[in-house]
Amino acid sequence: MKLFILTRRSLLSLGVCVLAGVAALCVTVTSASKAVETAAAPKVNPIYRVESDKKQVAISFDAAWGDEQTGELLDILDKCKVKATFFLVGDWVDKYPDDVKAIAEKGHDIGNHSDTHPHMPELSSDKEQAEISACNEKIKAITGSAPTLFRPPYGDYNNTLVNCVKSMGMYCVQWDVDSLDWKDPTPEQMCKTVLSKVKDGSIVLMHNGAKNTPAALPGIIKGIQDKGFEIVLIKDLIPEGEYFTDVQGELHLSQ
């Protein structure tokens, strides 16, 4: 039979082991609690569509890279007497200030699409705010007004980003009708895609650099109007007052 004699040193070692075990258990419990808390936090959605009994639809364009088609799109919108919302990246604003000025002077609204087009949820809240603020300042320097709308690059967002945008007094806006112009469908396919999905309060997504967007735009505008919809700016689609977005991202005024 072996006898274990507890010396002062062995007792000290045993105590250290016990304390280490307790600390590890506390870390595990804390981590688990945070995970549960995170999982339990309700998802905050941007605005994909606006609840409305008015037959109104908004058309939007994202501009992040080139500007080869911007002038042509503005000419088409002028000819059709339609106003649209352009979401601009700060880097794009730096490269094409004349286009930014033209968009504003023709009565279209300009939204914020971040400064450098990053995946925003990968950034800290401070860096998210810095991205948005930098783009706002560049647009304001050219047009005299800072945007009130923000669209996340890649449509990528999380609760932190949506809350950050709200804290800056802006609306975080997505879309509920994707023209899929970035996949280079034919103009006819684009028209069919958009017209099959638009409804009261819809927001249509298009891009200023997609191959067939200029060819499709007149047909999309006419098709929307033939359905009895008025085409308005996104900011005019959003009603004033306190609001919330449901699980589908539809904006409702708070009661």
Image: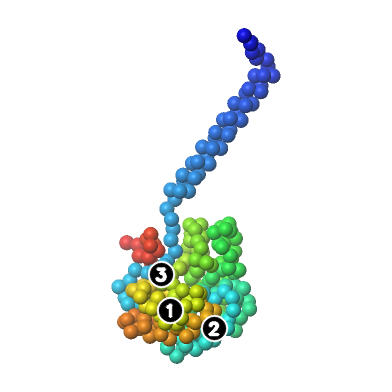
Which residue in the structure is indicated by mark 3? 176
> Amino acid under label 2?
Thr
Q: Quadrant of residue 177?
A: bottom left
Q: Nearer the viewer, mark 3 or mark 1?
A: 1
The Cα atoms of the two marked residues, 3 and 1, are separated by: 15 Å
- Looking at the image, which residue is at 49% across and 66% down? 155
> Amino acid under label 1?
Met
Which residue in the structure is indicated by mark 1? 190
> Amino acid under label 3?
Asp
Task: Indicate left or right for 222 with 139 as reference.
Answer: left
Of all residues shown, which one is farthest toward the right? 9
The Cα atoms of the two marked residues, 3 and 2, are separated by: 23 Å
Q: Earlier in the sequence, mark 1 or mark 2?
A: 2
Q: Nearer the viewer, residue 76 or 236?
A: 76
Q: Nearer the viewer, mark 1 or mark 2?
A: 1
Can see residue 101?
A: no
